[in-house]
């Protein structure tokens, strides 16, 4: 019901407040800054390079020539809008949901979840660590993304704990009702897998649910636009319990889910849908997997994405000991990677990046990890362009 979670909203009266607004390092202050802590987080996120690159990253469908197919950045905007509506109605902190939602997919690789799978296979094979976008998102804001402070020094985003927690806790793939935040204030580096812990705030829980609401509806519309599920529309009408006079579109799907969630959520039950809608949501997710995500149309691109990312990775891997060979094949790639790496390694640093040393390039495993970070930040088009230059005579 309306304002049913106002008593547990993130504000100065919340017992978790000091932990939620805590930063790893003290953030510089301006005498004329009028923003709140979470507003500062939001603006730091949208000024980051990783945020800007999401406009050229795949959400589900790789379709760079079609302006009307959802990109990763548009998905982020949909999650922000959905979480704002839910949080505002329930009486939660909309500034916090906005910051979390805007950054929640900042760690996604090129080519969406298919690209993520490729990088995970490489990472587990060569450095013994899993790659998953929620953890990569936290690493992006904590270690990789750099902004200049007022004195020109490069610093990491240094976001509040509440936003950082929301990024790594946002996994919307898990079927879960009655979602409530955890009580424990944990070291976020303790995460070893997606959905290991519930978010620390109710606002983080809202973004987690909003992510699922947003992608299920929009993916259906894109699939209809591309003609992937036209033969399955009768089944879709049945799942949604729509009569044939009602249009299947993002507006109707998202509105129905938000309305049901907002009218069934409270402190006792957590964020929850009614039994009927929750069952429908799980059936809808199963429908999406069978008809969209595992469709032949999408699967045909998997081998291509695998080839592109592995080719780039293997060439950069050779640059560790064979600089001449790698640069002969694609000088642009090697030079750009080493230019990027200079902000983070421990052999060539100056006073402006003294706080950002995260790779010891004398250790080959750390060098390979740097390559994975670097590739994860690429846009679809840049990765394809580099691949074409590598194979071109």
Image (cartoon, rainbow, N blue to C red):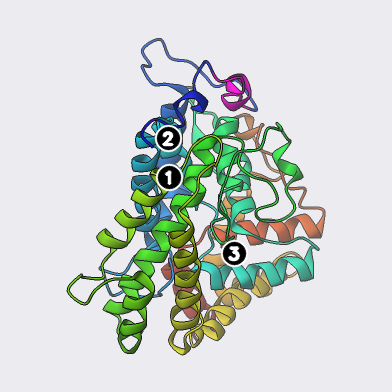
Mark 2–mark 1 CB contact (< 8 Å): yes
In the rendering, which numbered label is found on residue 102? Answer: 1
Q: Alpha-carbon neighbours of circle 3 within 10 Å: few (<14), some, or many (≥20)?
A: many
The single residue placed furthest to the left in the displayed view is 245
Q: Quadrant of residue 297?
A: bottom left
Which residue is nearer to you in this view: 116 or 198?
198
- Mark sitting earlier along the chain (2/1): 2
Which residue is nearer to you in this view: 224 or 51?
224
Q: Secondary structure at mark 3?
A: helix
Compared to 283, does 166 lie above or below? above
Compared to 15, does 126 lie above or below? below
Which residue is nearer to you in this view: 338 or 50?
50
Compute the Cα span from label 2 to label 3.
33 Å
Mark 2–mark 3 CB contact (< 8 Å): no
Magenta segment? 14-23
Residue 155, position as x, y percentages in the image? 56, 32
Q: Is any part of residue 219 visible from this angle?
A: yes
- Mark sitting earlier along the chain (2/3): 2
Labels 2, 3: front one: 2
Residue 311, position as x, y percentages in the image? 61, 78
Q: Quadrant of residue 319?
A: bottom right
Residue annotated with mark 3: 334
Compute the Cα span from label 3 to label 1.
31 Å
Kindly identify the residue that appears in the image at 60 percent across and 41 percent down. Answer: 199
Kindly identify the residue that appears in the image at 44 percent across and 26 percent down. Answer: 6
Q: Secondary structure at mark 1?
A: helix
Residue 76, position as x, y percentages in the image? 40, 52
Residue annotated with mark 2: 42
Quick check: 25 left or right of 65?
Answer: right
Picture quarter with the N terminus: top left
Kindly identify the residue that appears in the image at 45 percent across and 43 percent down. Answer: 48
């Amino acid at each position: 019901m309306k304002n049913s979670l106002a008593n547990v909203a993130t504000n100065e009266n919340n017992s978790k407040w000091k932990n939620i607004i805590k930063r790893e390092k003290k953030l510089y202050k301006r005498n004329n800054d009028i923003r709140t802590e979470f507003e500062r987080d939001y603006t730091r996120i949208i000024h980051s390079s990783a945020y800007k690159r999401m406009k050229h990253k795949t959400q589900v469908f790789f379709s760079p020539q079609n302006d009307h197919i959802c990109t990763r950045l548009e998905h982020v905007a949909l999650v922000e809008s959905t979480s704002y509506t839910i949080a505002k109605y329930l009486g939660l902190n909309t500034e916090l949901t906005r910051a979390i939602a805007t950054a929640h997919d900042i760690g996604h690789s090129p080519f969406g979840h298919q690209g993520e799978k490729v990088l995970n296979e490489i990472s587990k094979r060569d450095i013994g660590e899993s790659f998953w976008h929620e953890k990569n998102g936290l690493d992006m804001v904590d270690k990789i993304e750099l902004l200049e402070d007022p004195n020109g020094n490069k610093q990491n985003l240094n976001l509040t704990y509440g936003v950082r927690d929301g990024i790594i806790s946002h996994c919307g793939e898990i079927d879960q009702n009655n979602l409530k935040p955890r009580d424990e204030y944990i070291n976020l580096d303790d995460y070893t897998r997606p959905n290991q812990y519930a978010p620390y705030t109710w606002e983080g829980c809202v973004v987690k649910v909003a992510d699922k609401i947003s992608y299920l509806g929009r993916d259906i519309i894109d699939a209809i636009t591309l003609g992937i599920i036209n033969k399955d529309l009768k089944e879709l009408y049945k799942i949604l319990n729509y009569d044939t006079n009602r249009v299947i579109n993002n507006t109707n799907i998202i509105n129905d889910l938000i309305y049901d969630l907002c009218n069934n959520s409270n402190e006792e039950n957590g964020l929850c849908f009614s039994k009927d809608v929750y069952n429908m949501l799980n059936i809808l997710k199963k429908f999406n997997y069978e008809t969209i995500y595992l469709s032949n149309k999408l699967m045909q691109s998997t081998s291509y994405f695998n080839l592109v990312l592995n080719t780039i990775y293997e060439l950069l891997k050779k640059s560790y000991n064979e600089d001449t060979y790698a640069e002969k094949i694609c000088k642009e790639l090697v030079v750009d990677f080493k230019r990027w790496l200079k902000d983070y390694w421990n052999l060539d640093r100056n006073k402006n990046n003294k706080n950002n040393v995260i790779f010891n390039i004398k250790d080959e495993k750390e060098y390979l990890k740097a390559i994975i970070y670097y590739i994860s930040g690429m846009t679809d088009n840049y990765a394809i362009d580099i691949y074409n230059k590598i194979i071109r005579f």
